[in-house]
Amino acid sequence: MNKNNRQFELIYRDNFNKVMRLCLGYASGDKGLAKDLTQEVFVKVWDNLSKFREDSQVGTWIYRITVNTCLMQLRKKKRYLLKGELQNEIAVADEEEGSNKERQFKKMYRCIAKLSASNKTIILMELEGLSQKEIAAVMGMNHTAIRTRIHRIKTQLSKCVTHE
Amino acid sequence: MNEYEKIKQTWREQPIAEPSELDFKALKNRIGQIARNQKITNVILLATAGVLMYFFYFIEAIAFKKVALALGAMIGVLLIRVAVELFSIYTLKRLSETLNFTGFNEKLSKYYKKRIGVHLVLTPIAILIYCYSFWTLLPSFEASLSKGFYHYIVISSLVVLVVLGVLIFTQVRKEIRILKDLKND
């Protein structure tokens, strides 16, 4: 196994969970789609591995690839957007049957799905526990703008979850 | 605990299975498959160009100036359109996902603007040249082919034209939607 392969496997194992969680957020909780997106993200990681500089932060690098890949893949899938709406309807119908935890997940995914792509990206990283500085680096925005937007999105998300 | 903290708590409790050996194998297979597909595409394109050139030589098109010109134009616009498409795929692949969100979106918007330009200007010109060349070849076809085969060529080319038109329309609509989506964000 050469150095690239070893490094790739290490990156894969260390980052799989956070990439999968972020993809789940983009895929409104659709596990199958999130798995496909995660695989696509790691294909891109492999493609870009030679360009990765060891001195830069692997976390920010992975998040950039995840955000750009997930959004690009989902934009291509118009059917998914329709399916997403359909899923939301099914979720409402199923809500009575699911456990309390499942209901909370569905409600959270539905509210995240209502956000714009950039707001969704910011809040998913906030939920993942990234610092505002790291979020600003992934988004290519300044820290102050990110702080203001996080505050606004938190309020919007909380209101949505309360009224759903 | 406020509402947002409860959401954050729910987020952390999402059940995510650890990646298995099988998942990693599937990923490596996918990476290998992509590389193989790229090689196959290159072989197919080279073979197509070879067949077209052989056909050109085989029917001794060069001996008939008008036929040679029309066939040459048809092959030329096809090759140009394929080259543009390949360049476009290459450009999209080279868009680095390691850029930040804002930078990546800007590059993606520029890419789709160029694509729509190709669809709305270059593609209609290519189709017009192709159709006109084909139309000028019809008398030669009628003279040298059987009636049934001649009708088959005319009808099938019309069907291909309609199908192509629908495909291009669908693609343009999809790319305009993506561009709008990128601008709205």
Image: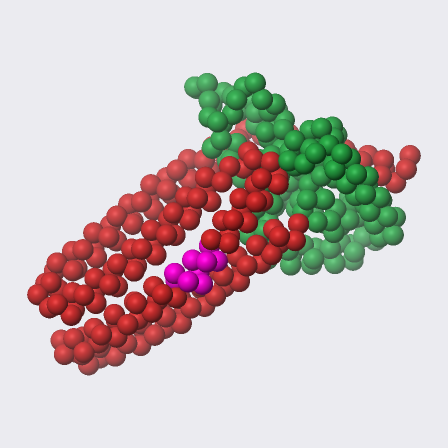
* Segment colored magenta: B115-123
Question: Where's residue B39, x and y in %?
Answer: 33, 41
Give the residue displayed 22% in from the left and 74% down from the top.
B136
Which chain is in green here? A
Q: Is residue B145 visible?
A: no
The colour applied to the residues of chain B in this rendering is: red
Question: Where's residue B28, x and y in %?
Answer: 47, 32
Magenta-colored stretch includes residue B74: no
Q: Residue furthest bottom?
A: B147
Give the residue displayed 47% in from the left and 33% down from the top.
A47
Magenta-colored stretch includes residue B120: yes
- Above or below B95: residue A7: above
Give the residue displayed 46% in from the left and 54% down from the top.
B115
Q: Is residue A119 visible?
A: yes
- The quadrant holding residue A99 is top right
Q: How is the image coloured?
A: by chain
- Above or below B63: residue B47: above
